[in-house]
Image (spheres, rainbow, N blue to C red):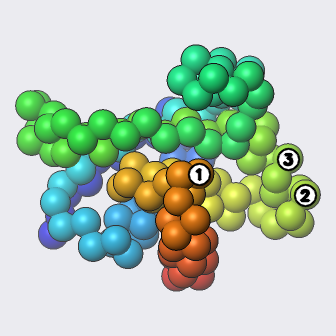
């Protein structure tokens, strides 16, 4: 069995975020051990990161920071970091009339696909692929 380490900063969302991340990794047939760090923040926190790293001075729902290095302590591939705005997730779940848990799972899956190299902002094909993969992964959850 493949070993993955997933660290989530907020215990309240840890179980559902980990479940979604594992589902995405399994769906993508990631057959090597990997590590992902997830930080749950607010709109101000994610806006600062969005401004600093993407030059977009506005809050967003989720950011992904791919890495691809080996952690020398456990020999796992560090896929990267994910940051999710709890405020945006709540707002979006209300607007879409769905549960907050489902929105967190969607954002985690979306972010994992980014960590694995998909980029809907640069490629229309990746956008199509990501939308379909997200639907399938969430359906499986």
Left or right placement of residue 118 versus residue 42 in this view: left
Q: Quadrant of the N terminus?
A: bottom left
Where in the figure is residue 109, as x and y percent of width and height? Answer: 52, 60
Q: Which mark is residue 121?
A: 1
Question: Between 95 and 49, which is closer to the camera in this rendering?
Answer: 49
- In which quadrant of the rendered view does residue 106 lie? bottom right
Where in the figure is residue 43, as x and y percent of width and height? Answer: 75, 28
- Marks 3 and 2 in Cβ contact (< 8 Å): yes
Left or right placement of residue 2 versus residue 88 in this view: left
Mark 1 lies on a secondary structure that is loop
The correct choice, above or below, for 31 with respect to 120 in the image is: below
Q: Quadrant of the C terminus?
A: bottom right
- In which quadrant of the rendered view does residue 98 lie? bottom right
Q: Which mark is residue 91?
A: 3
Asked whether residue 109 appears in the rendered view, the answer is no
Density class for disc 3 (Cα within 10 Å; few <14, some 14-19, many ≥20) is: some
Q: Which mark is residue 29?
A: none
Mark 3 lies on a secondary structure that is helix
For the residues labelled 3 and 2, the Cα–Cα distance comes to 6 Å
For the residues labelled 1 and 3, the Cα–Cα distance comes to 22 Å
Q: Read off the residue under disc 2.
A: 95
- Precedes in sequence: disc 1 or disc 2: 2
- Residue at 18% x, 55% y is 33
């Amino acid at each position: 069995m493949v070993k993955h380490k997933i660290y989530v900063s907020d215990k309240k969302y840890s179980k559902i975020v980990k479940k979604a991340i594992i589902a995405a990794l399994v769906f993508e047939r990631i057959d090597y051990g990997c590590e992902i760090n997830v930080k749950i923040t607010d709109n101000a926190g994610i806006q600062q990161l969005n401004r600093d790293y993407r030059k977009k001075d506005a809050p967003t729902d989720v950011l992904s920071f791919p890495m691809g290095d080996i952690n020398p302590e456990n020999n796992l591939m560090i896929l990267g970091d994910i940051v999710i705005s709890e405020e945006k997730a709540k707002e979006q779940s209300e607007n879409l009339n769905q549960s907050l848990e489902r929105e967190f799972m969607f954002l985690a899956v979306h972010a994992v696909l980014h960590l694995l190299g998909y980029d809907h902002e640069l490629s229309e094909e990746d956008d199509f692929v990501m939308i379909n993969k997200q639907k399938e992964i969430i359906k499986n959850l």
